[in-house]
Structure formats: C-alpha cells, structure tokens
Amino acid sequence: MTRRLRLGVNIDHVATIRNARGGDHPDPVRAAEIVARCGGDGITAHLREDRRHIRDEDLARIQAATDLPLNLEMAATEEMLEIALRHKPHAACIVPERREERTTEGGLDAAGQHNRLYPLVQRLSDAGIRVSLFIAPDERQIEAALLLKAPVVELHTGEYAHAVGEERAAELKRLADMAALAAKNGIEPHAGHGLTYENVQPVAAIPQLAELNIGHYLIGEAIFCGLEPAVLKMRELMDAARPSTSSG
C-alpha cells in the first residue's frame, strides 16, 4: 500500500493578520489547535529575523497547545540556531531569507554554503532536532544535502506552481525525479510553496514524497470558508491523488 502523504500547515499568515493591528487577534495558536482537530499532521512556523509574523513567544505557546510536531522554518544564523536549541522543535527547516522579500524566494543554496551550514546542521541534529533543507529540485542540491547529512529535504515547488503548459509538465518531472533521487539516497523528500487546490494533486501523486507543507493558500481560503473546511478539502485532494493510501 502507498503510504499516506502528511500535511503540514503553515500558520505564519494568521500571525501576519494579527500583527497588522499590533494586538493578539487572530491568534496563531488557535489556528494550530484547529489544524490538530481536523487531522493535520504538523504545524509549520517561520520565525523570521524581522519577526514580521510569528513572534518568539508564539513558539512555546504553539508547542504547548497541541501534540502535533512543530516544524520551525529558520534562517541559517546563530540567533535562530540558539532559538531552535532552546525550544527543541520536532524539525528545523533551514530556508534562505532576505529582509526585502515578501516570502521565501527560491531554494537554499546548500551546495554553495556547505562550510557555513555543516556545523549548524550538526548542532541541530545533535540536539535531536530533525533537520530539513528547503532546496530547489536540483541534483546538485540533493548531493549537497547528502554531504551535509540532512535527513530531509523540502523541494521548492514555486517554479512548478507558477509555470503553465509544457513548462509546468517539465517542472513536475523535475520534482518527481529529484524526489526519487533523494529517496534513493536515504533522504526523506517533502515539498511545498505555492500549492493550491488546483495544482496540488500532481505533486501529491509523486510516490516518494512524504509530506507537503502548505500555508498561505490555506489561510487565504480560510477567510472565505473557515480554516477547518480549507484544511479538510486540501486533505481530501491529497488523499485522492493517492487512492491506495493506508493510514500507516
């Protein structure tokens, strides 16, 4: 039986809306509780250096509110490393980060930053935190992840999401090929960025993928239908793409 594809829900943009007014509502912790209640498999939160959405105090509150594993997205900085070591999330996904970007643009250059990333990956791993690298679906980056001894890669699906026609088909093949290459080398492949109801199923059908992380789209849909229905619909679409999935 094909394994069930996990859904991690990124709750950053609940905090974006909260921070627009500077108060406490809407609370991202409440979003985490809803995700847990409706069958989500994990919570993803990106503590950015400029704290534009998730705040430091949110992390402990999220961890206390649900039993779902927390996937902390973080830049490769000493500050973020110390925060991760203090909170000890289930996983830490290292992402590229620039202050001027609206969201994470492109994948981490794991191949070009080996010497900077290696000690950080090792310190996280030694603390029992599962390290993931958010990378482009590129053979060179998969090889770099192997050298860095990262157990997980998250393949950036932005190029696929924004492509059309033959270009989209080519991007999907690249995702599938790199997921297969990662799995062949003992690295668990995840994927995320720009996934929607309309484009998720071809990605979800890639058999080697173990997890999708989806956030902005689900929070946007939640404005119109509520967070629980939005998550449940995404869950249904993902399951339909793997009709022979089991719950194991």
Image: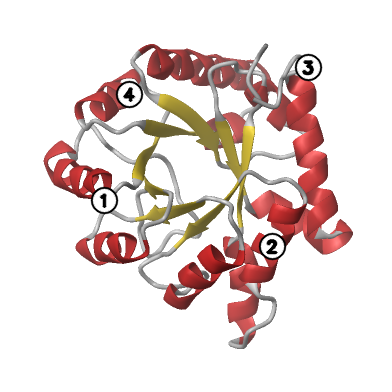
Q: Earlier in the sequence, mark 1 or mark 4?
A: 1
Q: Earlier in the sequence, mark 1 or mark 3?
A: 1
Real-space Cα separation, disc 3 to disc 4, in angstroms? 29 Å
Q: Closer to the observer: label 1 or label 4?
A: 1
Residue highlighted by disc 4: 142
Residue 122 position within the rendered picture, expressed as x and y whole percent measured from the top left: 19, 43
Which kind of residue does numbered mark 2 sit on?
Glu
Real-space Cα separation, disc 2 to disc 1, in angstroms? 26 Å
Real-space Cα separation, disc 2 to disc 4, in angstroms? 34 Å
Which residue occupies the foreground of this view, 126 or 121? 126
Real-space Cα separation, disc 1 to disc 3, in angstroms? 37 Å
Position of 163 relative to 216 (above/below): above
Quarter of the image where the N terminus is located? top right
Residue highlighted by disc 1: 127
Tell me where residue 205 sits by quadrant: top right
Residue 32 position within the rendered picture, expressed as x and y whole percent measured from the top left: 65, 61
Q: Badge 3: few (under 14), some or many (20 or more) residues near its Cα, within 10 Å? A: few
- Residue at position x 68%, y 46% from top? 40
Labels 2 & 4 near each other (Cβ < 8 A): no
Question: Could you say which disc has been placed on residue 243 in the image?
Answer: 3
Residue 8 position within the rendered picture, expressed as x and y whole percent measured from the top left: 60, 45
In the displayed structure, does residue 224 sit left or right of residue 178? right
Labels 1 & 3 near each other (Cβ < 8 A): no
Labels 3 & 2 near each other (Cβ < 8 A): no
Labels 2 & 1 near each other (Cβ < 8 A): no
Q: Badge 1: few (under 14), some or many (20 or more) residues near its Cα, within 10 Å? A: few
Residue highlighted by disc 2: 33
Q: Give the SS element for disc 2.
A: helix
Labels 3 & 4 near each other (Cβ < 8 A): no
Q: Give the SS element for disc 4.
A: helix
Q: Earlier in the sequence, mark 3 or mark 2?
A: 2
